[in-house]
Amino acid sequence: MQWHPSPSERRAHASLKWSTFPDNELALWVADMDCRPPPCVRETIYQAIEHGIFGYGTEPPGFRDAWVEHLQIRHQWSVERDWIVPVAGVVPGMRFALMAHPNIQHILTPTPAYPYFKTVPLVEKRIQHPISLNRKGETLEPSLAHIKEILNTQGEPSAILWCNPHNPGGTVFSRNFIHELATIASKNNTLIISDEIWADLILDDKPHNPLGLVAPNDQPTITLMAATKTFNVAGFGCAIAIIPEPNTRQRFLETQVAMPHVATLAYAVTESCLRHGWPWHRELINALKQNRNTVTEWAKGYPELEVTTGHATFLAWIESYNQTDLSERFVRQGVRLSPGTAFGSDTATRLNFGTNPVTLGDALRRMDTALL
């Protein structure tokens, strides 16, 4: 895996992760990685430059076919081409899903969850109902009974905003869990919107179970996916919403009027990754496993912390329970993590281990100093 050798390389190119905060800080916060993407990405960009014309574009003819083939091969999900709606990102897709259902006022969201799980319902002026996730073994797990209880007390239409694999915590939800979640939603006339952007960053021998594969095709579900996390191309905004049920899909399509569309190059980069990026992906998974092991070994020295890395993503969730200034303490030693407050916890922080092992080791040593 070709990691960037030093943070200065990334700061020189207006990186959100590395250019937002002072140069003396090691940035292990926002969820992108410090590595080059697959070679096919550069080849695709070079071809675009050689072509040299950058006018209005349209969806390439092979884009949906690439997704259909990918979902069948890697997830055993047979998807129809017309179920797919391209969007400029998973987070916009979450908002479009709520915009398409103005009658739904109650949104159930897992907590902790990455900040847009709070922000999107808030800007759409919906009532939020947190679903607590608690440490169980190596992962963070929700209570299906709690979800049932919330839905049973609601007399108005509701939606569940889900995340599988989960960010933070790396939980890969089982097929039985997803089936039960879909069944509960169906019985309560509840829409499920599932963010599955991490579906292809599972580090252990666990299958990803897409919502739309497990739920019946006539049930209202919206499954959101993208290649941007998997292949480290977050700067190319491109995602898809997979919506088997026709009425739900039509309402979603109607939200696309006068909205930003996927750029031509973003389409091309995504398709090239889905078709040619998998040898690189195998190297990435091995590298992330090594970095996860480094974090796991570091955590053994701090029994007062609960460090959850789960089975997917490149994120670790660090919970203290007796310190509300954990992130600030790390910042004072020059390590920038994501504060837990934005995720729903005042005593936690999120660490991104998708970085050069040298940078990760340096950051963990600084964190040692902060915890003295």
Image (spheres, rainbow, N blue to C red):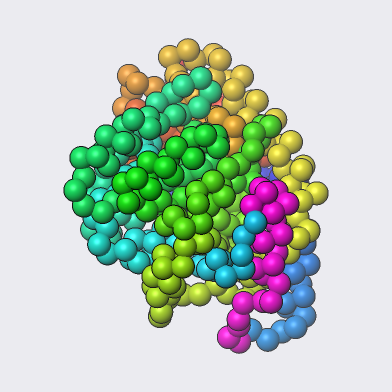
- In x, y percent, where is residue 244? 51, 61
Residue at horizontal 41 percent and vertical 68 percent from the top: 247
Choose between 82 and 26: the one closer to the eye: 82
Res 263 quadrant in image: bottom right
Residue at horizontal 20 percent and vertical 40 percent from the top: 153
Does residue 7 appear left or right of residue 334 in this picture? Answer: right
Residue at horizontal 52 percent and vertical 34 percent from the top: 176
Relative height, residue 264 to residue 95 (above, below): below
Q: Is residue 153 visible?
A: yes
- Report the span colored magenta: 55-77
The N terminus lies in quadrant: top right
Does residue 46 appear left or right of residue 231 in this picture? Answer: right
Residue at horizontal 34 percent and vertical 61 percent from the top: 98
Choose between 179 and 368: the one closer to the eye: 179
Relative height, residue 188 to residue 91 (above, below): above
Res 60 quadrant in image: bottom right
- In x, y percent, where is residue 220? 42, 57
Choose between 54 and 23: the one closer to the eye: 54
- In x, y percent, where is residue 368? 51, 21
The C terminus lies in quadrant: top left
Reply yes or no: does residue 74 show up in magenta. Answer: yes
- In x, y percent, where is residue 85? 53, 68
Relative height, residue 115 to residue 344 (above, below): below
Count the numbered circles shown.
Answer: 0
